[in-house]
Amino acid sequence: MKEILVLYYSHRGSVRALAEQIALGVHQVPGVAARVRTVPRLSTVCEAVEDDIPASGPPYVEVRDLEECIGLAIGSPTRFGNMAAPMKYFLDGLAGPWVNGTLAGKPASVFTSTASQHGGQESTLLSMMLPLLHHGMLVMGLPYTEPALNRTRTGGTPYGASHVAGADGNPALSADEIELAIAQGRRLAETALTLAAGRA
């Protein structure tokens, strides 16, 4: 079974909710499964460390997850128009896979959540694409052939699935946000499977 790595950092649960829907879309494609992983929180105190295994949710990502996947979806909440520090820290540490070309030629997509409608979703999605391009990945968005992209009044962009959580950080996704996240996962899995078959 080929696998898509769905990798995320979530602070209040919104990005995790998107990751779950993207994984659902991946599972709709025969012959492909989602491998869901997360990254640990960072601390401003250098001596503080996270446990090796999270208290709940999926395991922390390892380099072998990148090696074994045929595609990658990464998600992070927005921090002033950029990805959150834990995801950036993980991506910044991938010099080895970059030198080895571990991700080169594999498709990738991105997703995010913000508190407000114009809270930096698109700049965050674009910022997450940059390291993927440096790794030689084939970055995919969401086309306007997805009906929900035209009608959404909540989250959803052509750069990737998104969620508007509101000031209270509500992780409950709207119907359009769910539809777009599932479509993104399905599209990524279909493309990854096609590319993997071409490399075989």
Image (cartoon, rainbow, N blue to C red):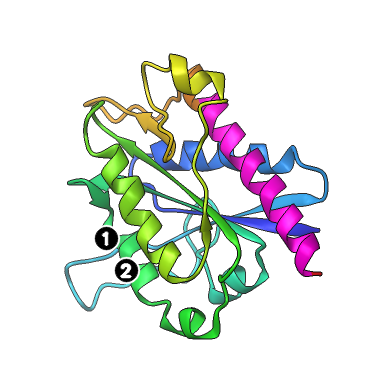
Callout 2 crowding tier (Cα within 10 Å): few <14, some 14–19, many ≥20: some
Q: Looking at the rendered structure, which numbered label has been put on residue 62?
A: none
Categorize mark 1 by other alpha carbons within 10 Å: few (<14), some (14-19), many (20+). some
Q: Which image quarter is the C terminus in?
A: bottom right
Boundaries of the magenta span: 178-199
Q: In this view, does 130 lie above or below 140?
A: below
| Residue 194 location (% of width, % of height) | 75, 54
Type of amino acid at the residue the image marks with label 1: Ala
Q: Does the magenta run of residues contain 191? A: yes
| Residue 104, horizontal then vertical, whole percent | 56, 71
Query: Where's residue 22, x and y in %?
Result: 58, 40
Residue drawn at x 48%, y 36% is 17
Image quadrant assignment for residue 122: top left
Residue 75 in view in this figure: yes
Tag 1–tag 2 contact (CB < 8 Å)? yes
Residue under label 2: 89
Instruction: Please give left or right for residue 103 compared with residue 190 in the image.
Output: left
Label 1's element? helix
Q: Quadrant of the N terminus?
A: bottom right
Magenta stretch, main secondary structure, is helix
Depth check: give the residue in front, 139 or 89: 139
- In the foreground, 84 or 43: 84
